Image (tube, grey):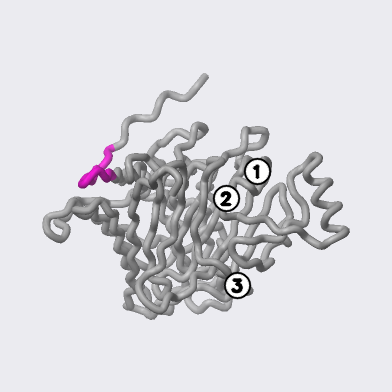
Amino acid sequence: MAPPPAPALDTLTLAAAGTTVEIVPALGGKIARLHLAGRDWLWTSDVLERRAPEPSLADDDAASYVERADTGGYDECLPTVGACRVPDAVAGFGGVTLPDHGELWSQEGATERVRGADGAPSALTRWSGRRLPYAFTRTVTVTDDGAVRMEYALTSTGDAPLPFLWSAHPLLPLTPDTRLELPVAARVRVWAQHGIDLGGPGAEHRWPMVRVRSAPGGHDAERVRAMTDRFGPPELDLTRPARLGDGAACKLFLDLPRPTAGKLRLAVEQGAARLEVAVDAGEVPHLGLWINAGGWTPFAGARPYRNLAFEPCIGAGDTLDAALGAWRSAAWLAPGATRRWTLVWRGRRRPVGD
């Protein structure tokens, strides 16, 4: 018997200048809708239904985000992305177990309307650490020109230096015409690969080219192997991420260069629409890319997803233990200190032929 449909969840909506943002507090403060430049950008799962997690889930170290809450939209991941155990050498927190995709998605993100600059529609969401001591806030404002400004603040509330990773986690559909505009020659490192060989975890490339040692099965795989034997690994341009090939998926991290002036603008284009995010690489030094071209699903025997995670993040590698170890990218906060950062999302329509 099929489970009963999920009850409707309260949603807080911000709208101005043709832009709409919908926030669902009960789903960990998930942004369920990001409508910019005349389109909804966020992918929505047709496998998992959006249901408020039961309260006990927030204390379950083994809780699986991908099996319970990977419904699409835009989540926040803190203090890790992948499930892990904090290394014993970390004073005060050694041995702490952190769940899949962090500990925000499984608790309610208390959200209230606040007054933005010049009366712009704005909402403040608050979370508290359960396994590590911190207070985290996100203020979302839709400005009078239709941009979506997200201001973050993380405060350490403990007595020992606090290590952490943070990642925005917006999921977009992966379409044949999806195009990425990212800093050319930025260092790319492989975190995970499925159905394709990009050199394995830790392998380094330079954006947008990655060396492909083997590709998804069939004739193409044999052709790639033959070319590799003769000429070395061929290169693939991931400006068009769907070129990864049907049946492949990978998680990559880019090191964002610090521009000499202004902020970096990272962009995704689909059809005649463009989504940009402006970041200060001194605040947000990495970008995670999850490209799933039908190469992965958490459910055995199920149809794999086709989606793209476009993730400004602090720290590289998906797990805090790896970031504290070989990846050497974890961030730290002194007791009582606060770290702040900002993302600004904008959409625009591209003229045909642009």
The amino acid type, in three-letter code, at marker 1 is Gly
- Residue type highlighted by circle 2: Arg
Looking at the rendered structure, the secondary structure element under dot 2 is: loop
Q: Is residue 89 left or right of residue 278?
A: right
Q: CA distance from mark 1 to mark 3?
A: 25 Å
User: Which callout, 1 or 3, points to the residue nearer the camera?
Assistant: 1
- In this view of the protein, can residue 69 be seen by the observer? no
- Residue linked to disc 1: 295
| 301, above or below 275, in the image | above
Query: Residue furthest toward the front?
Result: 353
Rendered image: mark on residue 161: none
- Are the residues tagged 2 and 3 within 8 Å (C-beta)? no
Q: Residue at x 56, y 69 (%)?
A: 186
In the rendered image, residue 11, in percent from the top left (x then y), is placed at 27, 40
Magenta segment boundaries in residue numbering: 10-20
Task: List x then y, in percent, for residue 338.
Answer: 32, 74
Q: Which residue is mark 2?
A: 240
Label 3 CA crowd tier, 10 Å (few <14, some 14–19, many 20+): some
Query: In the figure, residue 320 lies in which quadrant?
Result: bottom right
Task: Residue lying at the far top in this picture: please name it.
Answer: 1
* 242 shown above or below 263: above
**Residue type beneath disc 3:** Trp
Query: Relative to 261, is 310 above or below?
Result: above
Query: Is residue 193 rendered to the left or right of residue 261?
Result: right
Magenta stretch, overall SS: strand
Please give the residue where the numbered disc 3 appears in the rendered image: 327
**Mark toward the start of the polypeptide (1 vs 3):** 1
- Secondary structure under badge 1? loop
Instruction: Please tell me which residue is depicted at 40% across the width and 49% down the height of the picture.
Output: 274
